Image (cartoon, rainbow, N blue to C red):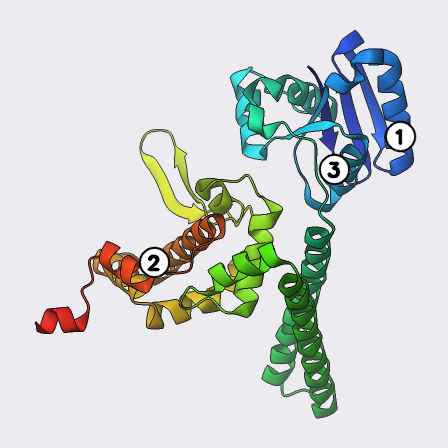
Amino acid sequence: MYSIGIDVSKSSLNIHIPKNNLDLKIENNLKALKALYSKLKKIYKKEIDKLTFVYEPTGSYSALLYRFCAEKKIRVFMINPKQARNFAKAVAQRNKSDKIDAKVLSQAIVVAKESEIVIPYINPIVEEIKELIAYYKLKVKLRVQLNNHLESLKAKEANKTLIASLKKDIAKIKKEEETIMESICNIIIKDKELKAKYESIISIDGIGKVAAIVLLHLFIKYPNANQRQIVSLTGLDPIVKESGSSIRGKTKISKAGGRIYRGTLFMPVMVAIRHNNQIKEFYTRLKENGKHTTVAQVAVMRKLIVIAHSLYKSGEFYDKERYLQNAGIQKEENLAS
């Protein structure tokens, strides 16, 4: 097996080809990828099928590369950015440039598990959901910006006509968001497997339609992620900043993952704390142990994601009785007897 390291950026790809110790820089477009593949076929000839592309997934910037590998049946190892950084430290590579990064990535194949080296598969339904979610995120971002501007104008008691116009624009965008979500729901309903997984997630007390769709999108986007990784991909993994042996900063969440997951789950957390007895008990216990409200809410968010991911994997529905027993909560009729 031969590993080709690829450092992905918005406009270019830096390539390291171990054979001949060759470094290339090409444009991040289909024409350049086709030319690269032709070059690789000349270099590796009959062993072209033994190639593995190693790169860090970078959202839309690496989407074309992913599709190209699926079309050409090229194996890929999409290494987690943190894993890549840790590997670079392990091989004592402190210098950093696109060229060096590509070389380090080609060497990082040694940390890949067999199950992590795969030929990409493009599922048209999943891709359509991803595109709609991306469009939904854009609409939400625009609505938040307009809302902030509206609040600013209200505070200044600005022109009433302008305020009215902004309210109309916000209402229109909100309606468009609802339409996008309905489109996604229609796609999910038509796919038997996705529908079953969606129903498993939405069975959790506190999780509504939008939150269930966003979580479903997260789980199908990263099908091989474990629970710890899936939390990290939402940016809810805790990080501690330390300096020397005596200075310790506050623990914070990394915020390295998609903002849409954290933003969408904020209201479900509030609902779950009030109406989901398991979550309510968990939250209360954290507060009694002196945790700050925000810290406790973030912990609840992580717990909801873990529960949803577990149900997504198993295909089961949220079992209130089982979770209450696990939380050590007895039903009122049992207490009465």
- Find residue 42 and report its horizontal and vertical position in percent: 89, 14
- Find residue 199 and report its horizontal and vertical position in percent: 51, 63
Q: Secondary structure at mark 2?
A: helix
Res 296 label: 2
**For marks 2 and 1 on the same chain, the one whose residue lies earlier in the sequence:** 1
Task: Find the distance from the CA under tag 1 to the CA under tag 3.
Answer: 13 Å
Where 203 sits versus 52, above or below? below
Q: Secondary structure at mark 1?
A: helix
**Residue at which label 1 appears:** 34
Amino acid type, label 2: Ala
**For marks 2 and 3 on the same chain, the one whose residue lies earlier in the sequence:** 3
Left or right: 68, with 256 as reference point: right
- Find residue 113 and report its horizontal and vertical position in percent: 54, 24
**Residue at which label 3 appears:** 66
Tag nearer the camera, 2 or 3: 3
In-front residue for pair 124/241: 124
Instruction: Point out the image quarter for the N terminus.
Output: top right
- Find residue 153 and report its horizontal and vertical position in percent: 65, 81
Task: Find the distance from the CA under tag 2 to the CA under tag 1.
Answer: 50 Å
Q: Residue farthest to the bottom?
A: 160
